[in-house]
Amino acid sequence: MRERDERGEAPLVRVLGRRGSAPCYAVRDFLYRSDVPFEWVELHGDEEAHTLAGVAHLHDPRLPVCLFPDGTRMECPSIRQITEKLGWFRSPSRTEYDLAIYGAGPAGLSAAVYGASDGLKTVIVERYALGGQAGSTSKIENYLGFPAGISGSELAERAREQADKFGVEILLAREGVRAECAPGQIAGHLADGTKLVARTTICATGVTYRRLGLPNEERILGAGLFYGAGASEAPLTRGEHVHVVGGGNSAGQATMHFAPCANKVTMIVRDESLSSTVSQYLIDRIYATPNVEVLTRTEVIGLEGDDCLQEITLVDRRTGEERKARSHWLFVCIGGVPQTEWAVEVGMQRDSGGYLVTGPDLLRDRQRPPGWPLERDPYYLETNIPGLFAAGDVRHVSVKRCDSAVGEGAMAVAFVHRYLADAERSVSR
């Protein structure tokens, strides 16, 4: 099966592996979200594994095997190894930047484009693929200026091209783990030991999908159980029954993405209806699609399967009645959890959910946050650490929409300029 060939592009990589393999899914998902044309070759037995992939059997730990046009063969590669092969992995070129951005979702990419186009020496750090959660969305149809809709991966790729044009340094397969904050300078420490120093920083790390918290969850993750829209998997679900958990736009978009391929798609929703959490155009489409079923006031309370998902247990929240359902495809889109544990160490204020508090929300009885060193209030997207801003889903009370994240990224850069201008005036006095 060939992926991403709708534009007539030749695959940049062939991926050979078996269905129900978490490492195979990780590679497919990364390539899809990175807008890399690839060909997925599904192996159906030990003989095909040996003759086509050159491994001993179908469950050989060397799978997936990735083959590149120059003859390179990679066995069960990590995402970092793939980025290196594609020529995307790089090291920082500067000892200090004007602006460092952590997270390359819509907010981070927007900040990078506006920051670099304004002349700021800008670097952006992303631990996985460009686009964040939006990058896994099959189609965004209510984004201004795209009446026919646009996939999250294509939107991210266009933003990357803009960022590259303006000289943004993009560090992929890197993750920030610790920060050091000093007046006029913020240092970010990456997991691989790299240290980035910048005059200002924008945290745009977004959120990760909330887990179900059920037994067997980790064991079958990526092998029938998926967090996010799983856009790369739609062709593999042809003729099968897909279950999507969640009552928001991301779950609705995933449902409609799978509907043309799957025999049936069941949307599992905790609430009584979709009306308060899903855009009306999407609700209309969901209920007009004959092979889509919506189960409201229903939860998944059990996962069964050995090597991969085979069955789920559902409970009706009104009656308490439980029932089993055969399922090899369960996609979970049930809200997010911000990755901000690092913020505690530097004393950054978070709300009870772990989201970063900024601007007016830092004030209590019109008083600035404890330890605030400046004679002004924090700017709107500024945290309680001067020069460190937050934008997008990671921020307290942000609007969880792609276009809002893009707007916040641009707005954060405007406040970065104000902060830097203040710093220069202080030096000149």
Image: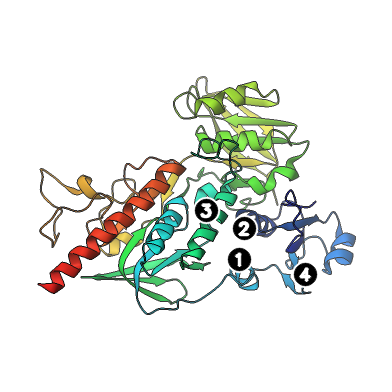
Position of residue 221 measured from the top left corner of the image (x, y, whole percent): 61, 51
C-alpha gap between disc 1 and disc 3: 16 Å
Q: How crowded is mark 3: few (under 14 residues within 10 Å), some or many (20 or more)?
A: many
- 419 to the left or right of 70: left
Under mark 2, the amino acid is Phe
Residue annotated with mark 3: 131
Label 2: which secondary element: helix
User: Nearer the observer, disc 2 or disc 4?
Assistant: 4
Counting residues from the N terminus, which is met first, the one under dot 2 or under dot 1?
2
- 190 vs 22, left or right, is left
Q: Is residue 321 above or below residue 381?
A: above
Any part of residue 393 in sight:
no
For the residue carrying disc 4, how many other residues have a C-alpha within 10 Å: few (<14), some (14-19), or many (20+)?
Answer: few
Q: Name the residue under label 2.
A: 30
- Label 1 sits on what residue type? Ile
The residue singled out by tag 1 in the image is 79
Q: Which residue is drawn at 50% across and 52% down?
A: 132
Disc 4 designates what residue?
69
* Marks 4, 1: nearer the viewer: 4
Q: Do the residues labelled 2 and 1 touch (CB within 8 Å)?
A: yes
Label 2, label 3: how far apart the Cα atoms are: 11 Å
